[in-house]
Amino acid sequence: MRRLAQTLAKRALQAKSRASSSSSAAAAPCLTHTPSSTTTKAPAMSPNSPQEANGSKRNLSSSIVWSPPITVDNINPQVLACEYAVRGEIVAHAERLQHKLLHNPSTLPFNELIYCNIGNPQSLGQQPITFFREVAALCDYPGLLDKDETHGIFSSDSIARAEKIINSIPGRATGAYSHSKGVKALRATIAEGIERRDGYPSDPEDIFLTDGASPGVHMMMQLTIRNQQDGIMCPIPQYPLYSASIALHDGTLVPYYLDESTGWGLDVSELKSRLQAATAAGINVRALVVINPGNPTGQVLSEQNQQSIVQFCKDENLLLLADEVYQENVYVDNKKFTSFKKIARSMGYTEKDFSLVSFHSISKGYYGECGRRGGYMEVTGLDSEVKDQIYKVASVNLCSNISGQIMMSLVMNPPKVGDESFELYTNERDGILSSLGRRAKMLAEALNKLEGVTCNEAEGAMYLFPRIELPEGAIKAAKAAGMVPDTFYCRRLLDATGIVVVPGSGFRQVPGTWHFRITILPPEDKMPSIITKLSTFHERFMQEFQP
Ligand SMILES: Cc1ncc(COP(=O)(O)O)c(C=O)c1O
């Protein structure tokens, strides 16, 4: 009898534990699909389902597995189509290695990861500009303006600037939403800065302040692309924001190729033939993107080249989208940045006969304030009804962040001769830019010494985009590993050295050519050791796959 009672008690316990484990399995979202877990077959297990409300409890069978209503099989296919290599699979692998470095460092052949994959200057040690940060700090904490000690810590012009900015914000409320285009007085300061830069008028009403240049680009893609038949011409190689945004908005990227053999030059005959081919294929080409200085290619366009682009857009009635976020990053004496607005105006085109949207940002230049998210787009030559629609779309996001708006106004109106901060500001700015120029040169020279590598100099921006002739054996090995050959190279580089770069395929490239993009941002004193690591890896890689 006692044994029978024990057996029954044991069975009851086992049954209870089976029931609780099947209900917890049912409650956990399941990412793998069983035949009964597809969205069509599996009933939803909502706690508010009518059966439960009626008190009739569903009998959970182990064959029914809950599946979330939104799965990777049924999300917007444009989201799946969108790729962003700058933070792609190589970076995901770097993050895994970072974790390993923390918990199991002896298993890795390096003791730090060097992130050369993204133009994020301050993450690699670049120091912010003192004047900009002083004004930002005072605007964030205006209470400091009333304290005597503040005058001993902050420069007189940063105090005056912060006061001016705060007084220009409605209600002096730096934590309030602003106008959806941005604080009017800050837009006026930016318009004045554009006028000083170009020598042509700029209207604050044409300025839309954004959280970096990226949201402005997305907004313009949203406005321009109506369906898959709408095409946007983009340089190849391109910064993947463009391919990603075009994919998200379900448009068609119409490539035009930059010519590596002429220092990533841009030939208007290439634009014409690509436009013709796209039109013949039934694509309505609506806009042309130009990135100057270029990313990932680093070229600075000549003024003649810019004029041909403007003329091409004018002749073909295309909207010109000018990405000018690297306008301060020019390192060669024989080139200088000139805005597309200045070029168009100097050719006699005005607000009335030429459509141009220019993008700028606080993320790059010598300021590198990427994480603060600030930028603007200047929308010219589009009629007021279209600008109203852009304003409406901007309003859906309420406004861009106020710190970014303030920073953008400072970038476009830095200290002037006679201001207390001027000397320090100039020293900091010139120190950063001249060091970036030296780093670009040093790295390009080293890359050009490597077997099978050719690299154009970086005239501007923050990157080098070397071409690698990969041995046949490496291409085969990449295929066997299920990787694109330049991704295979970058992955091997990362595993061997901790250096994170982006495969050229993420930016698109002439088919059959292989590249990678590396930033010039690591601190200057670290460059020699990075170059040694890179060169040693490359030699070994080439030896390994030599026929
Ligand atoms: C050419 C180009 N445009 C736009 C951006 C976007 O910058 P943000 O959104 O930070 O202003 C970047 C960032 O790297 C870039 O390289």
Image (spheres, helix red, strand yellow):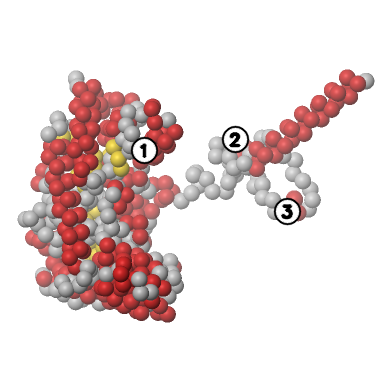
Image quadrant containing the C terminus:
top left
Ligand 1 closer than 8 Å to the CB at disc 3? Answer: no
Q: Position of residue 385 (x, y in %)?
A: 33, 76
Q: CA distance from mark 1 to mark 2?
A: 36 Å
Three-letter code, disc 3: Pro
Q: Nearer the viewer, residue 450 or 522?
A: 522
Q: Position of residue 437 (x, y in %)?
A: 15, 50
Task: Tell me if 53 is positioned left or right of 88 in this view.
Answer: right
In percent of the image, x 15 and y 72: which residue is there? 417
Does residue 112 show up? yes
- Compare marks 1 and 3 and give the one earlier in the sequence: 3
Report helix, strand or loop for mark 3: helix
Residue bearing the label numbered 3: 50
Residue pointed to by mark 1 = 94
Q: Nearer the viewer, mark 1 or mark 3?
A: 1
Q: Is residue 29 above or below residue 338?
A: above
Earlier residue among tags 1 and 2: 2
**Horizontal arrangement in the rendering, residue 451 relative to residue 174 (left or right):** left
Residue displayed at 86% across by 23% down: 6
Quadrant (top left, top right, bottom left, bottom right) of the N terminus:
top right
* Coordinates of residue 410 in the picture (x, y in percent): 27, 68
Q: Position of residue 439 (x, y in %)?
A: 17, 46
